[in-house]
Image (cartoon, helix red, strand yellow):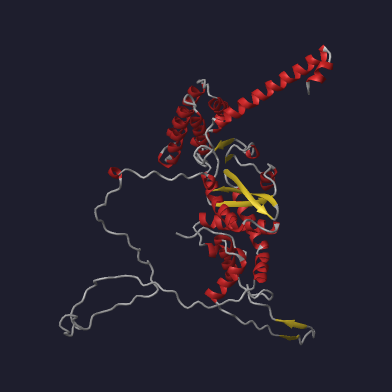
């Protein structure tokens, strides 16, 4: 707007223009202040937020001065491989002649001087069983008949349950692509399987693995407490979510296009566990009949961010309190219920004292408000042994999935993602029950439940 236009305007129009400009200046000034304050905040890192470790910037460590560099340690006995508890065979060697004077010592008394293991692989070759089904005509009714196929060797796919298990193990545990997997099977085992046949093997796995995952879900429905977490998953050109719900020796994974609460509600149906453990994501709240425990590790990182931002009133004391609670949680098996109840009262009292503090820093105020809203969800684990102080078990269960996602970049089809979730359910449950992964995969193909390994 130039001067000529302004000269032509009356007084009222000029006042309106000035007021509009003043409002805009005030708005822009406020926005500049917000941006300047944001520039002054510390960056989000894996140590003070939920940023995954892989996205954290890792600075080079400074070279320590010569006076503090590690000096050569005194010698000690080196580590060695433990000998096998049940060797396949034992070879005893006795000397026949003296290596010094060549005298015959075959009749002399000899004692054990050294014992060691020699480990070798036997020849690896596929075991091919030719099935011949005979039949004929019934002499009684004249109708044709044919002999039944042997158990677990039905006609159709020529590949058995153990070979299916090996393919799934190599594909979904080690992230081997189909081309390299086909080559690996040929080079190591002498089995010719095309890439298309590998895909068909995985499609045949959908039914038995879905059934096994459903059996594991039944075990979870009897648990007094459940824990959950989720991570991203790429399916085709869409973003999916991979959920894990677990307790003790059972875990179920779910692949779904949404992160909404509906996923957990569909999994639970009408069931509600007494307790739940998770982070503070709202989609996981309100699913427990009695109490919900929030992950203290997440809260400690949030408090650390407030410390990094400049709060020295509330956040440091909160970190000390939560870390102390975690230490008590790690040694619960050494404490009685009465002692845990004492610690619970002690921590609740200390938290009440902390909440009476009045931080002045913006991040401290925000953290203070959050803790005040969730104070009843911080120390539930002290009086309920079915819960943990942190949700780290969920993150450990999801870690192989994150690694697989980075190797493969996800899935092309939705059925592949759902199959992967069922396979992870079997593998994670097998790990917790001390079952060999190949045995667990084979049992799943043979429609057998996953029973805990015998000690």
The quadrant in which residue 13 appears is top right
The quadrant in which residue 29 appears is top right
Residue 436 is left or right of residue 235, and the answer is left
The quadrant in which residue 327 appears is top left
Q: Residue at x 70, y 53 (%)?
A: 237
**Residue 31 versus residue 268 in the image, above or below:** above
Q: Residue at x 55, y 62 (%)?
A: 440
Decide if residue 366 is in sight here. Answer: yes
Residue 113 is left or right of residue 156, and the answer is left
Decide if residue 221 is in sight here. Answer: no
Name the residue nearer the viewer: 143 or 45.
45
The number of callouts visible is: 0
- Residue 323, image x and y in percent? 45, 35
The N terminus: image quadrant: top right
- Residue 95, image x and y in percent? 23, 80
**Residue 29 versus residue 112 in the image, above or below:** above
- Residue 27, image x and y in percent? 69, 23
Q: Residue at x 53, y 42 (%)?
A: 391
Q: Residue furthest top?
A: 11
- Residue 53, image x and y in percent? 52, 46
Name the residue nearer the viewer: 100 or 329.
100
Name the residue nearer the viewer: 175 or 441.
175
The C terminus: image quadrant: bottom left
């Amino acid at each position: 707007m130039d001067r000529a236009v302004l000269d032509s305007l009356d007084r009222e129009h000029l006042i309106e223009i000035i007021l509009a400009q003043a409002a805009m200046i005030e708005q822009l000034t406020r926005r500049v202040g917000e941006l300047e304050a944001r520039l002054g905040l510390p960056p989000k890192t894996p140590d003070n937020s939920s940023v995954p470790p892989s996205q954290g910037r890792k600075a080079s460590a400074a070279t320590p001065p010569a006076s503090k560099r590690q000096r050569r340690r005194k010698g000690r006995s080196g580590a060695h491989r433990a000998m096998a508890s049940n060797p396949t065979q034992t070879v005893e060697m006795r000397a026949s002649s003296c290596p010094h004077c060549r005298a015959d010592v075959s009749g002399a008394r000899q004692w054990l001087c050294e014992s060691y293991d020699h480990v070798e692989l036997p020849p690896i070759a596929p075991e091919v069983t030719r099935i011949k089904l005979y039949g004929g005509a019934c002499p009684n009714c004249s109708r044709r008949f044919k002999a039944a196929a042997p158990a677990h060797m039905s006609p159709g796919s020529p590949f058995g349950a153990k070979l299916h298990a090996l393919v799934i193990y190599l594909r979904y545990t080690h992230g081997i692509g189909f081309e390299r997997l086909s080559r690996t099977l040929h080079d190591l085992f002498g089995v010719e399987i095309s890439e298309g046949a590998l895909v068909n093997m995985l499609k045949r796995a959908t039914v038995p693995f879905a059934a096994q995952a459903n059996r594991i879900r039944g075990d979870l429905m009897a648990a007094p407490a459940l824990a959950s977490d989720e991570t991203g998953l790429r399916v085709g050109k869409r973003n999916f979510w991979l959920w894990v719900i677990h307790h003790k020796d059972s875990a179920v994974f779910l692949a779904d296009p949404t992160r909404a609460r509906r996923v957990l509600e569909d999994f639970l149906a009408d069931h509600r566990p007494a307790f739940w453990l998770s982070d503070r994501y709202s989609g996981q709240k309100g699913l427990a009949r009695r109490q919900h425990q929030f992950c203290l590790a997440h809260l400690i990182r949030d408090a650390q961010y407030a410390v990094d931002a400049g709060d020295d009133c509330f956040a440091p004391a909160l970190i000390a309190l939560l870390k102390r609670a975690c230490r008590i949680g790690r040694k619960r098996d050494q404490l009685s219920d009465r002692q845990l109840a004492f610690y619970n009262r002690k921590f609740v009292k200390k938290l009440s004292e902390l909440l009476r503090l009045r931080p002045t820093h913006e991040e401290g105020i925000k953290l203070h408000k959050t803790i005040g809203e969730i104070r009843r969800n911080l120390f539930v684990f002290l009086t309920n042994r079915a819960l943990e102080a942190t949700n780290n078990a969920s993150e450990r269960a999801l870690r192989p999935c994150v690694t697989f996602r980075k190797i493969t970049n996800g899935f092309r089809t939705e059925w592949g993602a759902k199959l992967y979730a069922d396979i992870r359910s079997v593998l994670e449950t097998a790990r917790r029950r001390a079952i060999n992964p190949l045995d667990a995969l084979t049992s799943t193909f043979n429609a057998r439940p996953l029973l805990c390994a015998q000690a």
